[in-house]
Image (cartoon, grey):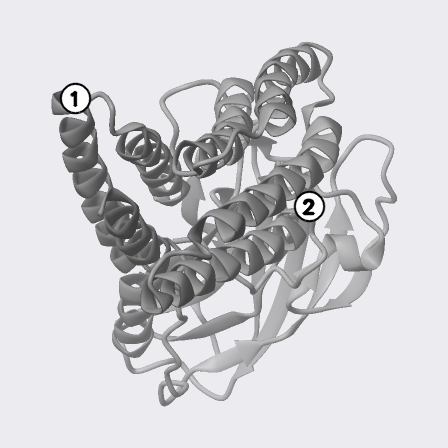
């Protein structure tokens, strides 16, 4: 009976965790202009400083550039006359959380940077991750004829930028809020519900300590929910290096906990796999601390996440071996849920490594 309950719970939780955050597809508002070409200048020391023409969306990894860095983008567009609307806006679905944005030389949006003037390199913070941005500004900044938008930003991961849409604020704001509902609000609610259900499972385990499966799965679900919820926090209260290390350790710990859960519901012993889980836990901790200390955690993550995927696949094998005797419906639901999670995890790994366009999104909510 406990096995059946675990199977149902696993299917439900992974159905929630694997919910794909769907971008709201909206028609382009009347009067708006989509900008899909820009001039690009890399601002990192030692990088090529000449202006280059680039197409948007611009994913740095696809152009052979690093995963992190700072840059300036300059975009131009023409207006036949002065806009009638009092407020215009710029919508960018993927822009660094550390940026400055100017319209015709006037600063209209500024997050976590330091303004040193248009002609100088912006003193940006050492953090930054791609987020959706809507920047509103008075239409008096615009003029008939040529107009110019200058954006400077820094990213520590998935460097690049999406297309821009500029137009009357009321039309852009509606589409932006719809996208925010699916891309950010819905995943946050899913993770909050997941954390609550995980707490309920841990209470069951606290009352019945022999239910190891409930304990391990409750811990796993709670960790995943808390980790995923921080993806939608733009400003972290801890230093960037510490935040990246915590993300890394949480990712590795989730794979270890999944393996521990698989072993806990198995009627057989898996001594070699159990040893591998213990070694993986200690190796992740040591590698994470050393990688952070020497500033090479990104390289450590690239290798370690392949091990995380490998551990998860072995966990699937253990679960498959265990649930073959379970009722067919529970078996199908469990396996479909876990296979879906593995596919989502592989997609997110490729996205994190910059192998997918910057306009993609994490499949894990």
Find residue 71 and name its label: 2
Residue nearer the viewer, 302 or 262: 262
Looking at the rendering, which quadrant does residue 290 occupy? top right
Q: Is residue 54 above or below residue 296?
A: below
For the point 54% across and 27% down, the residue is 244
Disc 1 secondary structure class: helix
Residue nearer the viewer, 47 or 310: 310
Distance from Cα at disc 2 to Cα at disc 1: 52 Å
Position in image of residue 63 (x %, y %): 82, 58
Position in image of residue 64 (x %, y %): 85, 52
Reading the image, the residue beneath label 1 is 206
| Left or right for 159, reference 268 | right
Q: Is residue 133 above or below residue 288?
A: below
| Disc on the earlier residue, 2 or 1 | 2
For the point 49% across and 81% down, the residue is 33
Position in image of residue 193 (x %, y %): 19, 47
Position in image of residue 5 (x %, y %): 23, 49
| Left or right for 263, reference 117 | left
Find residue 29 and name its label: none
Q: Looking at the image, is mark 2 or mark 1 nearer the viewer?
A: 1
Q: Are marks 2 and 1 in contact (CB under 8 Å)?
A: no
Asked whether residue 157 appears in the rendered view, the answer is no
Residue nearer the viewer, 319 or 69: 319
Disc 2 secondary structure class: strand
């Amino acid at each position: 009976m406990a096995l059946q309950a675990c199977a149902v719970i696993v299917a439900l939780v992974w159905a929630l965790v694997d919910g794909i955050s769907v971008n709201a597809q909206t028609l382009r508002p009347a009067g708006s202009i989509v900008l899909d070409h820009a001039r690009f200048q890399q601002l990192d020391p030692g990088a090529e400083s000449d202006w280059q023409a680039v197409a948007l969306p611009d994913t740095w990894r696809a152009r052979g550039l690093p995963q992190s860095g700072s840059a300036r983008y300059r975009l131009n567009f023409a207006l036949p006359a002065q806009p009638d609307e009092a407020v215009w806006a710029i919508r960018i679905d993927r822009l660094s959380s550390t940026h400055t944005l100017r319209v015709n030389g006037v600063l209209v949006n500024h997050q976590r940077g330091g303004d040193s003037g248009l002609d100088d390199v912006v003193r940006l913070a050492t953090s930054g991750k791609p987020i959706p941005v809507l920047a509103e500004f008075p239409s008096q900044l615009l003029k008939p004829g040529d107009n110019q938008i200058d954006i400077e930003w820094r990213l520590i991961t998935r460097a690049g930028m999406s297309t821009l849409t500029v137009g009357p604020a009321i039309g852009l704001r509606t589409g932006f809020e719809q996208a925010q509902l699916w891309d950010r609000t819905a995943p946050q609610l899913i993770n909050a519900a997941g954390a609550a259900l995980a707490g309920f499972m841990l209470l069951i385990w606290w009352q019945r300590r022999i239910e190891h499966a409930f304990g391990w799965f409750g811990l796993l679900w709670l960790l995943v929910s808390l980790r995923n919820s921080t993806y939608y926090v733009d400003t972290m209260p801890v230093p960037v290096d510490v935040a990246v290390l915590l993300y890394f350790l949480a990712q590795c710990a989730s794979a270890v906990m999944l393996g521990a859960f698989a072993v806990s519901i198995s009627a057989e012993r898996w001594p070699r796999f159990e040893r591998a889980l213990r070694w993986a836990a200690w190796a992740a901790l040591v590698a994470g601390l050393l990688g952070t200390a020497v500033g090479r955690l990104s390289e450590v993550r690239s290798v370690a996440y392949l091990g995380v995927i490998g551990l998860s696949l072995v966990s699937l094998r253990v679960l498959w071996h265990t649930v073959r005797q379970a009722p067919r419906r529970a078996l199908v639901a469990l396996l479909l849920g876990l296979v879906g999670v593995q596919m989502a995890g592989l997609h997110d790994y490729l996205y994190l490594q910059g192998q997918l366009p910057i306009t993609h999104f994490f499949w894990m909510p």
